[in-house]
Image (cartoon, helix red, strand yellow):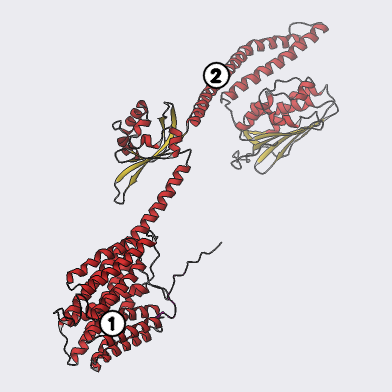
Amino acid sequence: MSTQQSTPRPTLPAWTPLAALAAVALIGGASALLAHTWVQAVAVWPVGLLTGAALASRPATRPVVLLAGGALGAGTAHLLDVDGVTALAYGLGAALQAGLAATVLLRGVRTRTQPSLRSKTDLRRWLVAGTLGPAVGVPVFLGIVLADGGEVRPVAAVLILLSSVLSHLLLTPLFLRIEPAPQRVDVTERALQWAAVGAGTIVIFVFQDDVAWAFGLAPLLVWGALRLPLREMVVQLAVTCALVLTLAVTEMGPFAIGGDTGMADITAATQLQLCLVGGVLLVVPYTLIAQQLRELSSEAHRERELVRRIMDSAHRTAIIGTDRRGRITLFNRGAETLLGYRADEVLGHSPELLLPRAELQTLAEAAGTAPEFHRIARALTSESAEPRDWRLRRKSGEVRTHSVTLTQMRDEDGAVVGYVCTSEDVTARVQRQDALLAALLTEREAVERLEQADRMKDALVSTVSHELRTPLTSILGYTTMLVDGDLGDLSPTVQQTMERILGNGERLRSLVEDLLVLSRVNAGALDLEAQPLDLRDVVRTAHEVVAPSLAQRRLDLRIELPDESALVDGDVSMLERVVLNLFTNALKFTPDGGQVVVTVTLETDEVVLEVSDTGLGIPVEEQDQLFTQFFRSSVAKREAIQGTGLGLSIARAIVDQHGGVIGATSEPGIGSTFLVVLPRLAASGSPRHRRGETTPIA
């Protein structure tokens, strides 16, 4: 996992504070030498550079820088023969201004990070710093002067305040971080703008005496604000103001201080400062806003280009945009591909062009509105943005099915300004779904017919079995009487024939009984007459039934029963059918000389009946079909062993009804083992536990 580190913001070089203080000393000394009065010197003293020096210095050295700047201010005033208290007061006021302005600009900025001028918040902070510092520092200076008995005229106080505000607003941006802006002006236009500003400054402030001419420079500065980056305009303002102040101090132009204009020095200087402050307040915010607009425009252009490329790359997705009245304003390449129209053929038209009349009417009815696209879109998008299948018409007239998602576009106030419709051609999918549905319906009809046939078969089997049962009972009864000699003695040949008839009749009756039980199982009507019984008695009864047939076989039959009662809750006749089926199967599939073992064992909560033999066994691949109705193994067919394939399926149904499980394991040529597990009853006749699911033996 990688850790992203934020890029540190740039800071000013370490030598910046010293350079700024040197510039303060140089400009202050020059103003003291060139100016004839302290008013002229104050008008150009760069207190804003002192603020810049404080911004560029470290917190530990910032007080030293401010004291050094205050000393330079006091020294400048002292060079103009100002008394010592006034000079010290001016220096203290300058240091206080710079400290407050720097504090405001550094508020919320991390240590050793350069404050910026890039947003409206930064712009407000710059304005507050440029006015708050002078608003506090100048009154402190004036208060000290007045307290010492000095005299300061109101116009002079305004001049000092305006000069301090101008210096802060003009020079502090040089020490702020200004983001580079996209360059949209060539070298020629930049050179022309600079030349126009320079020439205009010379013409207005050298050759003109009318104050109104000063406003002629504003259009040239606005030109730069609109086209040039903020950093360059700050430099241009500083150069222009420095030139204007120099010309004024040297008694040139409409704001000449101490010239022949007829104005008092202080009034002229105040007007000049007010004019320059207005210019700065016009150009800097205007340039910043223009730069932000250029950045937003550039970002919007990039985003628009990105969106256009994304939309054009969606060759298999149609993207259609409309205004709030439903007129198409966007038609991407995917829409051209899927619908066959060129963008210029549909722009300005309604998407109703793409909808068959019947589809438009269907959509309108579903939305509960008039058959007009913008009304349908408003109704559908107010509910949900879930995809819907629409039938759209290509330019060729072919109607295709599209999966359409319709969404609203809203402005910053939340008002709907349009709709975006994205769709994919799903005709092939719909055709496959229709074909699959038709196939499923056909299959369902076939299943229903099969189920009906199966029910008819069960009904037929049940009916036939019932109809056979009565005459078969009569036939077997009279046959038994003949075999037993109740109707007279029979010759040996007839006796043998009647015994065969009786044997086959018994087989037929067994088949009828199996069919009757099977019909009850399939109908879910295998009702049990459950009562507590001893499974040992069931095994003994089954043994008595098969005992006569064992007399003619050479088989080793072992029955192992526990001494304790094997109580279960069951139907005696049904459990006898299960045990007898397992007995007869073991005897039929075990050749002479083999062994059959019947065991009943008691577990804590279960009674287990196990019937194992050393017979022919069952192939592994057929063992999962043992309990299927009418299934007969390949071994039974090969050896011509009689059977119907119903016994084990009936046995399983009976065991399931008793809440037990039945399973088998077998190995061809080795033998088979069948297990029946039933819930055991306690001696009181109640179940020892509630049985859970038991996995059948495989």
Q: Is the magenta stretch mostly helix, strand or loop?
A: loop
The stretch in magenta equals: 8-16
Quadrant location of the C terminus? top right
* Residue at image mark 1: 45
Place residue 386 in its image quadrant: top left
Where is residue 66? Give x, y as percent: 34, 84
Left or right for 157, reference 559? left
Disc 1 to disc 2, how far (Cα)?
Answer: 108 Å
Place residue 39 in its image quadrant: bottom left
* Residue at image mark 2: 449
Secondary structure at badge 1 equals loop
Secondary structure at badge 2 equals helix
Q: Height in image: 487 above or below 519?
A: above
Q: Height in image: 52 above or below 596?
A: below
Where is residue 166? Give x, y as percent: 26, 75
Q: Are marks 1 and 2 in contact (CB under 8 Å)?
A: no
Residue 576 appears in the rendering: no
Left or right for 499, reference 246? right
Q: Nearer the viewer, residue 606 or 241?
A: 241
Which amino acid type is shown beneath numbered disc 2?
Arg
Where is residue 399? Give x, y as percent: 43, 27
Residue 250 is inside the magenta segment: no
Where is residue 409? Give x, y as percent: 34, 45
